[in-house]
Image: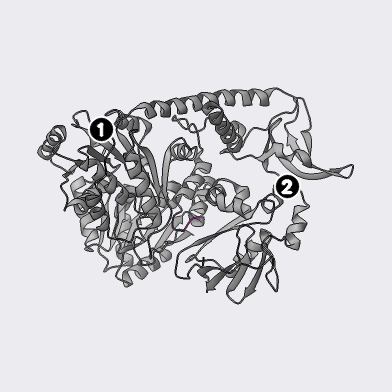
Amino acid sequence: MSITPDTDNSLLIVGLTPQFLEKPVVWYEEHQREITQARIANRLWRDKTLVINTGITRKLSEFLRELHDIGYVTVITLEHPGELTRTGGTITIFPINTRHPWRIEFVGNTIESLIELPKIESKEEQKSPEAIRLLKKSKLEWLRAGDFVVHTDHGIGIYRGIITKNDKPYLALEYAAPQGKDAQADMLYVPEELTEKISAYIGFRTPSIHRLGTPAWEHTKKRVREDVIKLAQDLLRLYAERALVERPPYEPIPELEDQLAAGFAHDETPDQTTASEEILADMTKRQPMDRLLLADVGFGKTEMAVRAAFRAALGSRQVAIICPTTILCDQHYETFRERLKNFPVTVARLSRLDSKPAQRETLKKLATGSIDIVIATHRALSKDVVFKHLGLLVLDEEQRFGVKQKEHLKNIQHGIDVLSLSATPIPRTLNLALSRLREMSTISTPPPSRVAPKTFVLPYSTASIKSALETELDRKGQAYFLCNHIHKIPLAIKNLQKMLPRARIAAIHGRMSEEAIIAIMHAFREHHVDILVSTTIIENGLDISNANTLIVQDASRIGLSQAHQLRGRIGRGTTQSYAYFLYPARHLKEKAAQRLDALFRTQYLGSGQDIAMRDLEIRGAGNILGRDQSGRINQIGFNLYCQMLAETVEQLRR
């Protein structure tokens, strides 16, 4: 299959290490998504693989150096996996994880195209001389001295490299020193044939090093195993109980549903089609749906919700769309009304934007069943909200809801279907989905002609701000300027007005009335405002194709998933957009630096799940069912914890 140069694509390039070289190409084809996710949370995968995308700025010389660093060798004629050639701005490479070579074409410092080339006859299964050399080396050579590792029998130690004893190589692991004055650290020497007992430690804080010859590690594993068994039992019981609940299936009405789908304003992507089919298939079953729809910002989550809500409404069931913010609620209300205006479906809004009499009227109609679909904020959690026959609950931006709020919503009525939408799920939710204990649909294909925002992570500079805004305004575009301190907004407006005297500037923040916020947002949407100064209140719900520059005044103070959501406010159309995340150069803390680095490294379309995985590493994964965000994971490492959980669930299912 040839990939045309004007199509946005990505290519995973796996480095030459003994572990990777031993795996067949089919293994990489089956696990490409898992590998891409692992790159975010696992430094070892990140150091030995590359992911490149068309349209991304990357210096050719730096890219070549990165390829050489992960083991690729420059040759005159490409023959084997693990080799590359270069002619001008074109690199031809044969990744060890693909069946075909690929041509990577640069225009300046931008990757213009990725093209899959024809098969090299009788060469694709052969090993290059470099691969043969690497296969003779230790399986764990890619560990760095100083890395924390987990030995399944002895616990967490520090990898100190490979030593030779009696002409035989051993992995040297350092463990805590025995108690006593001037005691030396204990060393464990592991022969290569037992390296399967060692794995890299992936945790979310600096771990405690264990001592050899003590029962502490076995006690730790025992406690974790007990917790894992209880967790697995709770999970399985929860989903077993839900599986026993039944409700009448939603029967499809093809004529009306096809008409609704045909009214979609964009070309439907294969992922959107698949997600829609999976959701609607769930609704035809007798068991209530509990599905997570994971799709990056602007990839079509709302359209999938519209179609699900439409089927429920046609089946005489009510639908509640719950949004975390008033702005998002207002936008969804407009979207649902527009999409369903030609169908026999009643759509209403319930938020603080509505007057008290209007709210009372909406509540009355919900109770009598004369409203089919209600778009609501947390107002829907109030005790006076009563549905006649609620059938479908849609939680938009699920990561913004707390555990209590979600459970309250689910308990409104037994047997309801739940569809959760998220671009960057919190680690608890993501783990639940990845554990295959909850159904998940993913839309990872960007809409046609969509252009990924270019991301810049820079020290704060008024010159950079002025240049970015002037460039945007010169092309008749609009911009967001994020100032996350309300008391600093007047000064920010004053400085911006001084830089750009003719710019029309307005501001919104959470202390303004909802009516004022919505009025300014409508003015911005209609291009009566050039620069919108705001707090993170703009994080969700804005879809303005003419706004294509985002400047975050101090990005060190916002979370990774939040930063990704903010970046999703721009680049909603075919125009190249630019996101500037500025930081105070002298006062940048380690975790803030990690967040900004992750943001810079994931500036490609569809990076929401990768962002969530990286966020998981920085913040911690925690207990899947509860609020504890540390749990036992740090005690044994993420790899071993997940392995124990997967094994336990499998055993309990038998």
Front residue (pair 284, 204): 284
Mark-to-mark CA distance, 1 and 2: 55 Å
Q: Which residues are magenta?
A: 602-606
Front residue (pair 514, 228): 228
Neighbours of disc 2 within 10 Å: few (<14), some (14-19), many (20+):
some
Placement of the C terminus among the 4 image quadrants = top right
Name the residue located 46 percent from the left edge and 40 percent from the top edge.
Answer: 430
x and y percentages locating residue 231 in the rendered image = 50, 26
Find disc 1 in the rendering and name its residue.
381
Q: Is residue 550 visible?
A: yes
In the image, taking residue 311 as reference, residue 616 lies left or right, namely right
Name the residue located 49 percent from the left edge and 67 percent from the top edge.
Answer: 3
Neighbours of disc 1 within 10 Å: few (<14), some (14-19), many (20+):
some
Q: Is residue 360 above or below residue 334?
A: above
Q: Is residue 92 above or below residue 413?
A: below
Give the amino acid type for the residue marked by disc 2 in the picture: Lys
Tags 1 and 2 touching, CB below 8 Å: no
x and y percentages locating residue 514 in the rendered image = 21, 46
Give the amino acid type for the residue marked by disc 1 in the picture: Leu
Q: Earlier in the sequence, mark 1 or mark 2?
A: 2
Find disc 2 in the rendering and name its residue.
139
Q: Is residue 252 above or below residue 129?
A: above
Residue found at the far right of this picture:
166
Q: Is residue 177 magenta?
A: no
Q: Is residue 485 visible?
A: no
